[in-house]
Amino acid sequence: MAGPGEHFLAEIREQPAALLRLLEHDADYDDVARTLAASPAEVIRLVGHGSSDNAASYGVYVFGLLARRTALRDSISLTVYYGAELDFAGSAVVALSQSGRTPDVVEYVQRARRAGAATIAVTNEPGSPLAEAAGSVLPLAAGPEHAVAASKTYLTQVAALALLAGCLAGRRAETVAALRTVAELLEDILAPLEDAVRELAVAFAYVGRMFVVGRGLEYATARETALKLTETCRVAAEPLTATDLAHGPIAALDPLFPVWAIASRDEALPVVVEAVRRARAAGATVVASGNAAELVDGAAFRLPVPEAPDAVLAPLLSIVPGQLFAAALAHSKGLDADRPAGLTKVTLAR
Amino acid sequence: MAGPGEHFLAEIREQPAALLRLLEHDADYDDVARTLAASPAEVIRLVGHGSSDNAASYGVYVFGLLARRTALRDSISLTVYYGAELDFAGSAVVALSQSGRTPDVVEYVQRARRAGAATIAVTNEPGSPLAEAAGSVLPLAAGPEHAVAASKTYLTQVAALALLAGCLAGRRAETVAALRTVAELLEDILAPLEDAVRELAVAFAYVGRMFVVGRGLEYATARETALKLTETCRVAAEPLTATDLAHGPIAALDPLFPVWAIASRDEALPVVVEAVRRARAAGATVVASGNAAELVDGAAFRLPVPEAPDAVLAPLLSIVPGQLFAAALAHSKGLDADRPAGLTKVTLAR
């Protein structure tokens, strides 16, 4: 039996290999994208819970930027619980679930499909109820994930959305090549980042609450980083867009209330840098990660990553510091990241 | 000059009157709804920051349930910072800003309008840049709001969205009548709730972090309650859907980490009750508010409100306990809810 947190750490380390396995299925993604391109779907509805919903946040941007499509994180409860009779005829659904067994995601897909939506399941379990419910199935191919806290399935979900959007834009080969480069970069950064997060974990041993800020493409990374810290380290880490921080939460900051900023070189970077300036003025300790970590003034800790071959793929690299930091902090607190209290691998909760 | 928190409390108390003032403009709402009903807009894009974005969360449900329209909280950064070239021809935009001066909301509206969207500004300042940028303007008529923490402008934004959706469904008279009844109910509950929250404020004097859970219609209430606590009381209160709580954050709970549940009689109630059961099992202290507060097992504190004449209007009543509790807790902590540290009334931050 694995020791505390060993699965989580092993699965973080396995991410470059998991990404390469996903890319073996690029023809499947291209097929589904061709069908989608030929359909009248004007809106892409993304659904999922937890890490899958965090990946969906990325989907909003990657479909908008690569494929000029409006994608939204749709309300599951509006359709499944309230039974709202929306018009699904002009929609495609991309449903995200590692296990393919999340009950209300499965039910959402069944209802949307009956109401005329094109439905696509993106899952690590192609034999699951979700795969059965959807019109098309795209595999994550991440391999079995044993830790309750997701890592490689989040990263492959993000990559799957980028691949689907790239194919939809008619840029399959270019997207696959860029994602292969990302896999190489991931391989390079894992060991140095594992060393770098140890120091930070010692400094943060007594932190009970934190804000994690990002904007645009990196809002997904902020959400997933916060979720890892909350579920594995018992830190109340709240994800915020850099702008939302200024609209209220900044008033709660003090020197014992750190802010983690995801800073990457793209059009949203100035907003993130400015939010950090305000957080620093309020006395917060700042951690900066991302490929523009060194451009964040006054950060007490920096966990930089290299730039991706395309700025739209930066979140695949930016998530790694948060994952490794969560693993290190859980370890230093004596918590088991593989089996957090009160959680199970497949969340059947509605 | 008003004493600490006096404006905030006065504006919470003024909400029934503010709601009645909004209803004097029902003909304006009906006119805009008729134009919208006749337009090809298939998707309603809601944009706003802070409390306005919380009201937008409600809009997703009220447009879906009353008017069978797909509404989404759109990404401002995708259009304004990244310059994504989305198809806006089939969209209507409802832009929410109390001041009408939020820079990137104004810019979003300008870009969406140029790209072919029908644009509607819902604002407390009909002479503002936002009103000028939009094709139509709907007044909140809440009267001047002096406290930095929004209360009556949030409530009137929620009511404005319900009124617009009701008119869009061809149910103007019925919606106006129901909202008038809500104004009467609000008037009745204010004084008793002010008494009830005092006891809770004493018990929560040392709470530093909290989860606020709701689902569906009441997710907006959970978000706004959490924002009030964060900005006025320096509590790190994170809003979560009841389902998201089970997908990770529940692992962070302990007896010093309370959970506030918004429980109203509607189709999402069983999910909220079940989430609270799990939170209780993890040792959390539970506060329950909403018109189904007494159906939440094991709550240490309950702040019930009456049912609205239509379940879809419940959030107009459910928000009041959180507002009054924030005012009372800020007061007992010696904080000034009118002027939280680091915030200004009009947030010009991008």
Image: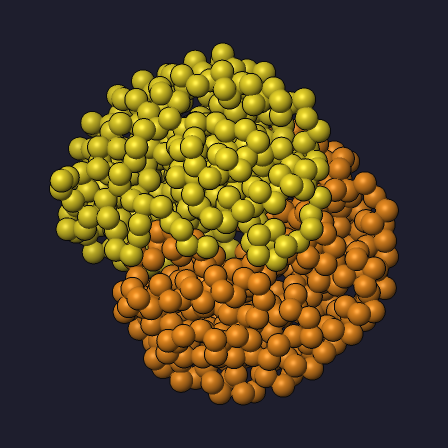
Chain colours: A orange, B yellow
Q: Is residue A29 left or right of residue B172?
A: right
Q: Is residue A164 left or right of residue A234?
A: right
Identify the residue at image location x=25%, y=55%. B341
Identify the residue at image location x=27%, y=22%. B187
The one of B192 and A1 positioned closer to us in this rendering: B192
In terms of image quadrants, where is residue A141? bottom right
Q: Is residue A134 left or right of residue B217?
A: right
Residue A82 in sight from this viewpoint: no
Percent of width and height locating residue A70? 68, 47
From what the image shows, is residue B5 above or below residue A324?
Answer: above
Percent of width and height locating residue B84? 66, 53
From what the image shows, is residue B13 above or below residue B251?
Answer: above
Report the label total.
Answer: 0
Percent of width and height locating residue B301? 26, 40
From what the image shows, is residue B294 above or below residue A315?
Answer: above
Percent of width and height locating residue A337? 48, 71
Identify the residue at image location x=83%, y=49%. A37
Q: Is residue B208 left or right of residue B319?
A: left
The one of B263 and A164 positioned closer to us in this rendering: A164
User: Quarter of the image containing the N terminus of chain B?
Assistant: top left
Residue B66 in sight from this viewpoint: yes
The one of B167 and A77 positioned closer to us in this rendering: B167
Identify the residue at image location x=46%, y=17%. B26
